[in-house]
Image (spheres, coloured by chain):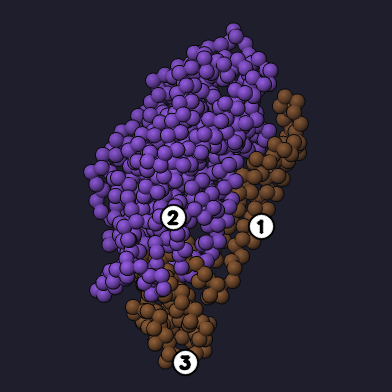
Amino acid sequence: MSYESPIRDQLVTGGKTYRDVTREITRPLESAPSKGWWFGFSLSTIVLIIWIYATSYSMVVGLGAWGLNKTVGWAFDITNFVFWVGIGHAGTLISAVLLLFRQKWRMSINRSAEAMTIFAVICAASFIISHMGRPWVAYWPIPLPNAFGTLWVNFNSPLVWDVFAISTYFSVSLVFWYIGLIPDIASVRDRATTAGRKFWYSFFAMGWTGSARTWHRYEVISLILAGISTPLVLSVHSIVSMDFATSLVPGWHTTIFPPYFVAGAIFSGFGMVLTLLIIAREVMNYKDYITEEHLDAMAKIILVTGTMVGMAYITEFFVAAYSGVEYEQYAFLNRAFGPYWWAYWTMMTCNLIAPQVFWFRKLRTNPTFLFIMSIIVNIGMWFERFVIIVTSLHRDFLPSSWAMYAPSIVEVSILIGSFGLFFFLFFLFIKFLPSINMAEVKSIIPTHAHADHDHSHASHGHEVIEKGAVHGN
Amino acid sequence: METSKKLVLGVYDNPDKTYSVTKKLISSGFSVYDVYSPFAIHGLDRVMGIKRSRLTVAAFIFAMIGLSTAITFQVYVSYFDWQVNVGGKPSLHIPTYIPITFELSILFTAFGMVSCFFIVNKMFFGKNADIMDIRVTDDLFVVAVDVKMSKADMGSLNQLLMDGGAIEVRERIKEL
């Protein structure tokens, strides 16, 4: 029943049968973890311990352990928060927006991208909670009656909007991810050979039978979830940008922030998706599922969004010059030529200039090159948030309050440690859940009955024989 | 009420064959109880006469509940229950309620609709799946014909299923 585009290359290569898909994708779940997995998992656990130590230290000693001062009250904490939230945007973008646009190349990458979303939002939330300094009062932004000891929250504040936005985003992404997982969990359940695996996958498969009636409803809710997740993704990063844009701080007080942040989030998210998938297709041998065509498509999105972000940087400069507000003008000149010039030009190089190499198809399909580029994109986007936050704060209206900021070792440890948290969760995910959506991938494999039709090819006839052999036993 | 159903199962290895055999069965007067497949077969729901799911309506209703809850709550808190003077700004300021209202509408839609999905499919954590074939979540497709409800001659059923390319035909009693 699947329609095959005459101009697109096959999305899944290697002439896979449905059984091949199930077998190859469930293999990591059913066999003992490889050496590569153990190495990655142990390394991320060690880094995670650094995160736990540094975060607990900050809580015990207080935020004096960080390099913040009276002028620069937000720095590494919020930079890391926005960085991780941004990364968390590609997952839902891939599964929701590309579903609405019927882009089938999403199908072999959406599962791991959504997992990445969830883990990245967990990392982001950890920064929100730790930057409060007193995590035991983290419930204060939740609207609770005055009698509870807190005042009702101020609904005019974007920080309160952010609490709602991030928690909604996290919960809806989790639901979307889980709904997508159910048929695949059922596949693992029906192949399970050990009692433990059978029990747990049965538990989470919720009695899935693959009935056509269920599939009908499943498709309906998937479409609606995609429909509501798309504006959700856009709204979440818009609201994150309003944390800055609704203030009066020069450099933050600009109307371009919401679209600019959304483009940046997609850009950095795709950067991280590339990093993860290039590793995954090597380590887990998924090259037939995540083909060079997939990498090519993602590189194109990086090129588009990187250029959009670059255009926003230049627009900001223009608007500052054109506005005639000297504080704004100074903020931008200070960014580019002040004491933090190196951060600004790192950002410009990594985000605007570097992605322009993706005009060349040869470079878009070279995995090693793409891997390096994806790291560069991540570095660039981290610096973007650093530039926005620190350079705007450290010199604003009152020159007598000007100050410099340098991170303490504790802050650097928390940043590095958050990658440990992220990869720790990611390694658990690829061990215990199918990291490619099997049901969707099966639906885009050419159906083997084509040999019966008029437009049959010799290769299809071959596949029919192979399949017959499988069922003969 | 009957407690079990007698089904005849045709097992296929291909979605196209499954689709055409289902179509043929229905046009020759058989009652197709259900079709089981490892992935959604497009157009099959229409052939089987499955009515368009009303989960879309449920989604809309939940969105409206979320929207009105959010608006009512924010107006109640910041205007009626306890007005807080923040920089002299108005306490009742509808535009700043929009972001939270939007988020809560989506939250209610997602959770409400997905809960309804689980309820109509009778799905819950830990449910024992009554699967027709162990490989239906892997690479096989099963067409289940309800013997009692079918109006056509049962003798031709086996032939019809085999002609459609079935790799196996068997009977099965399904407990309801």
Q: Give the label, 3 or 2, closer to the camera.
A: 2
Task: Please name the residue that numbered disc 2 is placed on.
Answer: A8
> Is disc 1 on the same chain as disc 3?
yes
Label 1, secondary structure: give it.
helix
State the residue at coordinates (32%, 61%): A15
Which residue type carries mark 2?
Answer: Arg
State the residue at coordinates (52%, 20%): A390
Q: Quadrant of the C terminus of chain A?
A: bottom left
Q: Position of residue A95 (x, y in %)?
A: 49, 50
Residue sitting nearer the eye, A339 or B64: A339
* Cα separation between marks 2 and 1: 40 Å
- In this rendering, position of residue A183 left or right of residue A225: left
**Quarter of the view holding residue A210:** bottom left
Which residue type carries mark 3?
Answer: Asp
Q: In the image, which disc is placed on residue B100?
A: none
State the residue at coordinates (54%, 23%): A389
Crowd tier of the residue under label 3, counting other residues whose Cα lies within 10 Å: few below 14, some 14–19, many 20 or above: few
Q: Give the label, 3 or 1, closer to the camera.
A: 3
